[in-house]
Every structure is written in C-alpha cells, then in structure tokens.
Image (cartoon, grey):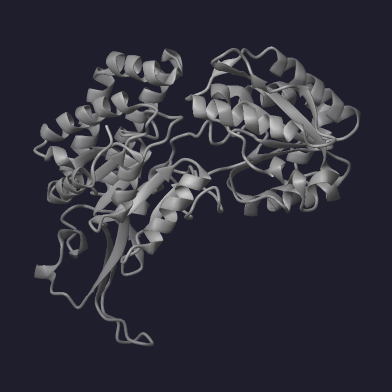
C-alpha cells in the first residue's frame, strides 16, 4: 500500500484545491458535526476493524471513538463561536505616541496540514483525531499519513469523512490519505504543505521535525515525541495513604498495557517505612495485573529488550519483573533504584528514558535534596505529578515548592491524581518542553486550533474592502476587542 511520490503529490494538490470550500465557517462547522454523526453511525464496523488490527478491545475502542466524535463536535462549537479568530480592531489615535493608524487584526488559515497518525490511539490520534479535527476547524484541508498498525481502519475512517464532506458540497480531497514510510517523507517536503502534526517516537518525530526545518520554506512542525511523566510522592503523603497511592500508580502505569503517552514512567518514593508500604501496595497490585498484547511485535521486542537492559544495571531491583508473557503478550512490572544513582550523569541515565509499555521506575530518595537533584536531570515532559498529604495540600510543608519545581518540566502539572486520561476541555494543555513536544502548543483541547493559523493585520484598509470579520458593524457577530474594549 506504499504511496508513490506521484500519489502523495496528487493527494496534497487535491487538498490544496479544496481550501475554498472550507472558507465558510458555517459550512465547516456543519461538516465537523456530520463527520461525528457518520462516524458514530458506523461504530460497529469501525470498532470491529480497529480491534482486528490493534487488539485494544471493543470497550476501549468504543470509548475512544466516542471521544473522537466529541472532539469533532467541540471544534464545531469553537468554529461557530469565532473567538479563535482573535479579532482586534484599533481606530486611529493621533494623540498616542507614536500615533496609531487604523489597524485590524485577525487570524487566517495556513493551508494544507500534514497529519501523522499515532499507533496507540487509532481513533483519537489518527485519521479523524485531534490534529485533523482542529485543522479542519481552522479551515485547513488535511493529508493524513496512516499508521502502519491500522491501515484498513484508516481507509474506512477517511471514507466516512469524505462522505460527510460531500454532504456539504466540500470536495472529497479535503481529506487525503497516504501510506508508507517514504510517503511520510514526501509529504513533509511537499511545497504546498504548510504545517504538520505528529504523535510518535522521538527518533521518527525528530527526523520529520528536521526535514520540516530544512525545507526551502520551513514550516511549523507540532510533534509529540516522548515523555517520562515523573511523579513525586512526599513522605507525608506516603505515610498517610500508601496503599491507595500504590494501587493508583499500578492502575495508571498498566492502563492500556502501558501504551499511553502520559504513563507515569518514573516515580520518586521516599525511603523508609512509609515508602516501603507504598512499594508493597504497588507490588501486590501489579502482580495481579494480567499480561497484555502490545500494538505490534516491534513494540513488544523493544519493550522486552528495554526492560532487560534496565534490569541488568547494578543495584536495580525488580520487585515485579516486567517482560515477556506468552508468545504474544507482555507482563507488567516495575524496577527500583536508589536516587543517588540518578543524581549525576552515567549508565543509569537509561532509566531517565521512556520505555513504552507496562513498566515504571521507582526511585527511592532519602531527602528533599536528592529528590530535587533527580528532577533537575529530567528532560521535558507532557505531565508531572505530585502526591501530597492533606496538610501539604492545605499549604503546609513544601507543596508549593514542589509545584514550582515541577512546572518547568511539563505542560500539565497534577496534584493527587494520575496523568493517564487527557480530558478534551478548553483549559487542557497536552504538550510540554522538548522532547515531549517540538512546540509550545497543545494537541488536545480547544486551543489546539491555533496551531494551524497565522495573524494578519490590515492597516488603513477602506471598510468596503475589509473581510467581514474586521468591519466595524461586525456583521458576523464575532467576539472581538474593539478599541481596547472586549466585546462578546
């Protein structure tokens, strides 16, 4: 199914020609809602196809499809509201220093967006996922590079989206789909592609990021690459509720067979009796977790090799040994190591790298200085979590300090929760410092639409020539800032 360079070119050009059909916000909002309805209507067929290719199970996949449909409808609402256009109008002011001319600013669509599907979310981060939904909402046609782990599902979903587009007079080329590694390279290089969204490995994402920057005309590349998602357990929290924290950690790190990008991969646990109780709770819970199937054999091989290499490091223990289950499954487990092994550069740095699958590393620290020293060596992450006692949450102790230490590390900081589960909400931020992502934007939530737009300001343009979004009488009824005053 590998697409040729000519087929990639045809898909991009067809998407480019479909831009005009997305110009009307009313049309594209209706398209997004129809796409959600049609995907929901094809639920049984789509879930069956997804399960056949991913083995994620009907329950998980049905929920993920519902999330995907919700995302499409949420972006339709955002498009209808119009605040994402960021309309700002300044009338002339000769009394200002320097004088202000007539200025009117808003955001316009970039153009064709390349979307690189993820393996672990065949609906929510794939053909009809958040990158596609937000790009279409911004008025940008999309060409998707399908993930090789679910090619048949990708074709089915693309067909549903194209039928939804046709119902609103939008050319089917508004959703392009290509398969194959070389097709992905051709796509990022195509001169009509104006931006890209990616979810996947650091190696693959960095190669595409570099290719996007090396083009004669570089383009924005919004990549989600990898994340360790550190967790800090304070001594007071461990003493207060060791069993609950251990059980919660086990559930989070094994959820979806550990194949979530926000899986907690490194957990700082205090030394001593309180930490021992937490580790015992974690041991009991992980020991009772069934073996599971990873998305493909390459991931299974990498997981088995990765945990074995980590477990072979001196003074690294395996209270529950992760690794091979049956011929096709893997078993969950975790490793423990003293914090002093991670406070300086060396062989133990391997433990600071993401290992995709049901494993986490428990780092036992003796004092706050050791905890801070380990945190100072971590790369950027999607999330960072702290578990506090009731007193610390009320303002006692170092709670605020720990939040301040975690904030530079991640795009989402959690208190007394677990990072798995990324709500689709206006205030959500799913991104973080490199290598978690290659930009400061989010790929989940309403502001994800901002990635596919750019600002334009008109100066001194006659009212009759302005786009309707920027006219004084506001014929579209848009939220805007008019001469310094916010209007809704």
Provide residue 348's location: percent of width, then percent of height: 76, 44
Percent across and percent down for residue 5 are 23, 47
In screen coordinates, is 441 left or right of 362? left
Q: How many marks?
A: 0
Q: Is residue 391 left or right of residue 296?
A: right
Q: Considering depth in this image, is 27 or 81 the residue closer to the camera?
A: 27
Q: Residue at point 17% right, 33% down?
A: 162
Counting from the top left corner in percent of width and height, residue 302 is at 58, 31
- Residue at 50% x, 34% y is 422
Q: Name above or below for residue 179 compared with residue 402.
A: above
85, above or below 226, in the image = below
Query: Measuring 75% from the left and 15% from the top, which residue is drawn there?
Result: 284
Asked which quadrant contains residue 48, the reply is: top left
Residue 488 image position (x, y, % from top left):
31, 53
For the residue pair 370 and 216, the one nearer the viewer reads as 216
Q: Is residue 485 left or right of residue 413?
A: left
The answer to which image quadrant residue 328 occupies is top right
Q: Is residue 413 visible?
A: no
In this rendering, does residue 196 appear at all? Answer: yes
Position of 232 compared to 384: left or right?
A: right
* Viewport quadrant of the N terminus: top left
Residue 167 vs residue 468, the one in the foreground? 167
Q: Which of 353/77 is in front?
A: 353
């Amino acid at each position: 199914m590998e697409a040729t360079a000519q087929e990639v070119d045809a898909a991009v050009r067809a998407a480019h020609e479909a831009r005009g059909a997305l110009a009307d916000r009313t049309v594209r909002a209706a398209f997004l809602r129809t796409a959600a309805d049609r995907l929901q209507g094809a639920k049984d067929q789509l879930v069956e196809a997804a399960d056949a290719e991913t083995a994620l199970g009907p329950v998980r996949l049905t929920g993920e499809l519902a999330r995907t449909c919700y995302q499409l409808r949420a972006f339709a609402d955002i498009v209808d509201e119009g605040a994402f256009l960021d309309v700002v109008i300044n009338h002339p002011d000769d009394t200002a220093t320097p004088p202000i001319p007539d200025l009117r600013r808003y955001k316009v669509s970039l153009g064709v967006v390349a979307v690189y599907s993820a393996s672990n979310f065949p609906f929510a981060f794939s053909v009809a996922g958040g990158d596609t939904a937000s790009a279409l909402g911004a008025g940008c046609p999309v060409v998707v590079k399908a993930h090789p782990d679910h090619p048949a599902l990708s074709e089915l979903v693309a067909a549903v989206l194209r039928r939804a587009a046709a119902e609103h007079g939008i050319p089917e080329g508004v959703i392009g789909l290509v398969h194959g590694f070389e097709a992905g390279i051709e796509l990022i290089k195509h001169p009509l592609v104006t931006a890209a969204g990616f979810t996947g490995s650091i190696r693959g994402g960095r190669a595409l990021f570099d290719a996007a920057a090396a083009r004669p005309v570089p383009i924005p590349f919004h990549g989600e690459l990898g994340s360790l998602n550190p967790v800090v357990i304070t001594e007071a929290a461990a003493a207060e509720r060791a069993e609950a924290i251990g059980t919660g950690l086990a559930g989070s790190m094994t959820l979806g067979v550990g194949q979530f990008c926000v899986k907690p991969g490194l957990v700082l646990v205090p030394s001593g009796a309180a930490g021992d109780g937490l580790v015992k709770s974690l041991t009991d819970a992980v020991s009772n977790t069934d073996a599971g199937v990873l998305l493909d054999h390459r991931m299974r091989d990498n997981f088995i090799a990765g945990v074995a290499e980590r477990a072979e490091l001196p003074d690294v223990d395996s209270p529950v040994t992760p690794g091979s289950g049956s011929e096709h499954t893997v078993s969950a487990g975790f490793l423990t190591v003293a914090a002093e092994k991670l406070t300086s550069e060396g062989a133990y740095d391997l433990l600071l790298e993401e290992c995709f699958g049901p494993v986490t590393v428990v780092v036992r620290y003796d004092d706050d200085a050791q905890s801070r020293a380990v945190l100072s060596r971590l790369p950027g992450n999607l999330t960072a979590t702290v578990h506090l006692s009731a007193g610390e949450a009320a303002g006692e102790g170092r709670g605020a300090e720990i939040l301040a230490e975690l904030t530079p590390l991640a795009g989402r900081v959690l208190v007394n929760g677990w990072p798995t589960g990324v709500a689709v909400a206006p205030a959500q931020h799913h991104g973080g410092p490199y290598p978690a992502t290659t930009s400061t934007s989010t790929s989940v939530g309403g502001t994800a639409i901002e990635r596919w737009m750019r600002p334009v300001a008109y100066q001194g343009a006659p009212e009759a020539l302005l786009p309707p979004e920027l006219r004084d009488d506001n014929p579209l009824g848009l939220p805007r800032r008019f001469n310094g005053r916010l209007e809704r």
